[in-house]
Image (cartoon, helix red, strand yellow):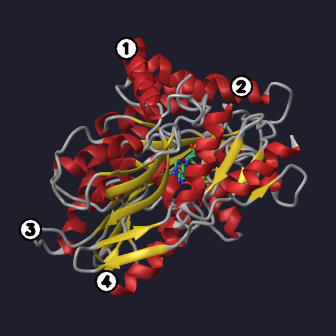
Amino acid sequence: MTSTLDQLRRLSPILEPGQAGFEAYLNDRSVWTEPAAPLAVALPESTAQVSAVVAWCAEHGLPVIPRGAGSGVSGGATARAGSVVVSVERMDQILEIDQAKRQVRVQPGLINADLRRVVEPMGLFYPPDPASLAESSIGGNIATNAGGLFCLKYGVTRDYVISLEVVIGTGEVLRLRREVSKDVMGYDLASLVVGSEGTLGIVTEATLRLIPLPSDPVATVMGRFDAMEPVGRAIEGLFQAGLDPIALEFVDPIFMDAVARYNQTAPTAALDGPADPDSSVGPDGSDGPGRAGAVRTSVLIAQIAMTWPLDDPANQGRKTETVFRQAGARTVEWSASEAEADRLMADRRLCFTALSAEGPTVSEDVSVPRTELGRLLVAIERVADRHGLVIGTMGHAGDGNLHPCIPIPPGPDGDARAQAAFEDIMRQAILLGGSVTGEHGVGLLKAEAMRQALGPTQMALHRAIKAAFDPAGILNPGKMLA
Ligand SMILES: Cc1cc2nc3c(=O)[nH]c(=O)nc-3n(C[C@H](O)[C@H](O)[C@H](O)COP(=O)(O)OP(=O)(O)OC[C@H]3O[C@@H](n4cnc5c(N)ncnc54)[C@H](O)[C@@H]3O)c2cc1C
């Protein structure tokens, strides 16, 4: 054992079992995943060190667990026994910013928000904005093809990857795609790596596209709805009316109340509806989330920006208001100021953090065609009733991507009930023509659901692709491919 660790130590800085900080690398933020002790955690500081560690693992048949910032929620970075966790957190530099080309070359451990902070004063913008942007890494974002609030307008991480440097399962270093806008030379291997959750290679460098910093949103319109069907109608209506919001987010009363408790304030004034006496009891008869003081209306928040053709933004705001009202909104309000709109979006980003601060909570992440969103919301309510659970739902309504979140109830069967609901929601999404994950990834938690949804032929193709990148099968084994 000692000589094995000595060999590894010669290739890269490492942390060994028992050393301070070691435990922090065993899991991500998922529930229901059980990490087992890895042999060591490698903390490489260069592509050469990543390559050497992976080649050494391939030679010794040791599993490699690629790791960014560990903010994943599906068990993608969960360690397994005898593996080597390869955390790229020390490779966190911006290597080059090219303003003329509007692109940036970065190392994978760079935190998303730090990239934005550096390029924004130059009038440039990196749009992919997971709610975890202050803590998640660019490498992790690429490996999960992370999305976020403004992906409705600007697209997801894949849309901003120009080229990648990747260490594949043999330890070889590949540069995937050229730094050109147009390139149809061969299969698009870079796109395969995006969203591959560390199963095809470790991203050691990325060249990313930037766009001119957009103007701030000029109107934020909020509709409050008493039921889920009108929410679905409003979402469809917005797009039918030709509107082009940059973000269209949904928050249900359970989350609004949780955020208010987290902030220790009253629910955001602009969203504050009259308390409903029925809200004193949650759907399962408990006094958990959904208890006294809860606002019983759901909220759709649409942010409007200047778009082409240049329409008066106020006019677009008024059109949005009309659509919300015609769909059956109880009330429609405009944010009184930009600061208030920013606070609303910040509260939206806080949703999961606020609910999970109250107890173990599992976040679902399903997506359906936008036109099916109303039906999905109704189906989630039925799932909650069927399993006697509280389920808070929020998400990217404009993308048809929702995050129903299940606080795990206390008691011996709490996990089993929550897990049954988790799977039930994935089944509902598939029935509506959707996917079991829109942006959080498959990891360990959804590998079986993906296998069932894709069927044997597509799974065989996935395995063949993995074998081509990773012949020894050492890269994140057991993740994504059940
Ligand atoms: C509060 C909260 C809010 C969130 N909101 C969103 C959201 O809005 N949108 C969204 O998409 N996700 C969201 N997430 C999930 C998570 O933050 C994203 O999946 C993020 O992209 C993970 O990045 P990370 O650096 O933490 O990666 P990790 O958790 O460390 O790893 C994630 C996966 O990527 C692999 N990986 C990591 N780095 C590399 C690399 N360099 N090369 C190859 N593989 C690698 C890992 O093996 C693992 O499979 C949220 C999570 C939390 C806790």
Residue drawn at (34%, 86%) of the image = 122
Mark 3 closeness class: few <14, some 14–19, many ≥20 residues within 10 Å: few
Q: Secondary structure at mark 4?
A: loop
Foreground tag (1 vs 3): 1
Q: Amino acid at mark 4?
A: Gly
For mark 2, what is the residue? 417
Q: Kindly identify which numbered label has been placed on residue 457.
A: 1
Between 387 and 451, the residue placed more toward the observer is: 451
Dot 1 or dot 2: first in sequence order is: 2
Mark 2 and ligand 1: say if the CB distance to the nearest ligand atom is below 8 Å: no
Looking at the image, residue 124 sits to the left or right of residue 132; the answer is left
Q: CA distance from mark 3 to mark 2?
A: 50 Å
Q: Earlier in the sequence, mark 2 or mark 4?
A: 4
Task: State the residue position of label 3.
Answer: 309
Q: Quadrant of residue 58?
A: top right
Of badges 4 and 1, nearer the viewer stands: 1
Which residue is denoted by mark 4 in the rendering? 123
Task: Specify which label sits upstream in the sequence, 3 or 4.
Answer: 4
Residue 179 lies in quadrant: bottom left
Q: What kind of residue is marked 2?
A: Arg
Residue 481 image position (x, y, % from top left) = 53, 26
Q: Residue at x 72, y 38 (%)?
A: 83
Label 2 and label 4: CA atoms lie apart by 49 Å
| Label 1 – label 2 distance at C-alpha | 32 Å
Query: Tag 2 or tag 3, which sits nearer the N-term?
Result: 3
Residue 58 visible to the viewer:
yes
Pick whichever of labels 4 and 1 is earlier in the sequence: 4
Q: Examine the rendered structure and indicate whether residue 279 appears above or below residue 375.
A: below
